[in-house]
Image (spheres, rainbow, N blue to C red):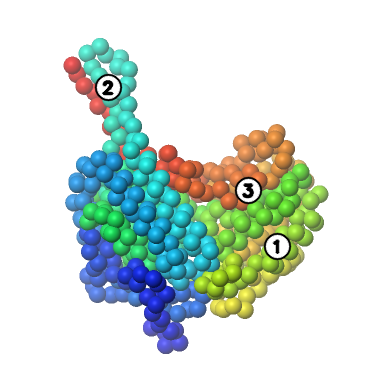
Amino acid sequence: MNASLQQIDIRSHLKDPSLFREDAFINGKWVKAKAGTTFSVNNPATGDIIANVANLNGADAELAITVAEQALIGWRSKTAKDRAIVMRKWFDLIIANTEDLAILMTLEQGKPLVESRGEVAYGASFVEWFAEESKRVTGAILESTWGDKRMLVLKQAIGVCVAITPWNFPIAMITRKIAPAIAAGCTMVIKPAEQTPLCALALAELAQRAGMPAGVVNIIPSDADQSIAIGKVVCASPTIRHLSFTGSTEVGRILMAQCAPSVKKVALELGGHAPFIVFEDADIDAAVAGAIASKYRNSGQTCVCANRFYVHQKVQAIFVEKFAKATQAIKVGNGMTEGVSQGPLIDDAAFAKVEKHVADAISKGATLVTGGKANASGLNFYEPTILSNVTSDMLITYEETFGPVAPIIPFDNDEAVVKLANNSQYGLASYFYSRDIGRVWKVAEALEYGMVGVNTGIMSNEVAPFGGVKQSGLGREGSIWGMDEYLEMKYVCVGL
Ligand code: ADP
């Protein structure tokens, strides 16, 4: 342990201290790593050590896979209605414990409490939604081409699944995967991000209280090195039938390649580089509000954050003026302080990347409108920043920044801006503001993105299909389609 770091007792912050767990959760039991090792979790706002969590390895992962396989038999043979009853109880418990979960989240991830509370509700919504959807899985009876045969389609749980999740949404990225999986009758092994295992473990505690049978949900925390080892084990395992990953495109490619030998089904929610277009007929105040919400939420650390602002020349001056004023009003600080609207970046590597993107843009001729430096609140705090006169040779226009920096690029015609917006290896979220109904349809159809926000900067919820095209990933999460990932179609032909 670094001697300069303080170890704080997180339990004192919680109404229910038993939600704070440092052991792994396998087969309904709290267990240590076989090797007895732990890794530390830090509060990104202060650097304090807030937990020493079991550091599992490949052998522990094998055990979790085995128990999930054993639990599969009982869980998938329950009726959907019975699975839904457990899930609904879990949803109620998550909501009832919102404040403690939000505190755990802010302490390990850094986002302001108000955002953490919002994420608990968002994360819980997937549990509620898929509890309901589980009852609506529907097969089919086909019109047979043979008089003496009948043809049917059954939909069945794919089997044991694994989820590898990121730190930016420590609850929602987990529930968005577990909920459809267990609703379908699958069991799951979850490896949370090394930065944010505490929310995942608290979710497991609540799942157990809800009556989730042992082995249906297993949480195997690990540090960065063991994550790589565990990744190899779960990808190679013939027992695991589905891997769901949210994280960087780079790691997504590695996992996809590792899953190839066992021909595993994969769902990947990877990086993004969202364009945010403000046309000359836009409601500028609405566009500014959308830009603030889309850009600075979670300190700019979401895969759907606006990364490139294309603003029509005719409205550029007024947009920049209003956007800068709203940006300067953002209160940066420790997320545990009420009233703070932007917390720290997750770690020093994240901070260094933001600094690099800003320095690169300025060295190539961008103008700093506001921000552009560290914030005095602490080590990893960066000022909400706007750059204007940005050009497409600057790193920030094609690499994901994952930080609170808004680069503004002027444009003067629709066709050119759509082309610029589509000029990316990514295709996750996109946004534009216009009041012209013809333009709205044309641009929404032309954008090569999995999601398009028209006159809004926030669009994710459990009802909508979340996911990307191109190198932003494969598959969709949430919505009536989210369970398809976890269901296999089986064709049955019955001779009479
Ligand atoms: P980020 O850059 O946002 O931290 P990553 O893609 O590196 O995203 O990490 C997302 C998740 O993937 C985390 O849970 C991390 O531990 C895990 N991870 C990173 N590299 C690997 C790997 N090679 N194999 C398996 N999991 C990995």
- Which corner quadrant of the image does residue 329 belong to? bottom right
Identify which amino acid the numbered label 1 is placed on.
Answer: Ala
What's the distance in space between the residues labelled 1 and 2, CA to CA? 61 Å
Q: Secondary structure at mark 2?
A: strand
Mark 2 residue crowding within 10 angstroms, few (<14) / some (14–19) / many (20+): some
Identify the mark nearer the N-term, 3 or 1.
1
For image coordinates 34% across by 54% down, the residue present is 90
Q: Secondary structure at mark 1?
A: helix
The reply, left or right, for residue 355 in relation to residue 266 is right
Q: Quadrant of the C terminus?
A: top left
Please name which of the two marks, 2 or 3, marks the residue nearer to the observer: 3
Q: Which residue is mark 3?
A: 456
Q: Quadrant of the N terminus?
A: bottom left
Please name which of the two marks, 1 or 2, marks the residue nearer to the observer: 1
Q: Is residue 423 above or below residue 251?
A: above
Q: Secondary structure at mark 3?
A: loop
What's the distance in space between the residues labelled 2 and 3, CA to CA? 46 Å
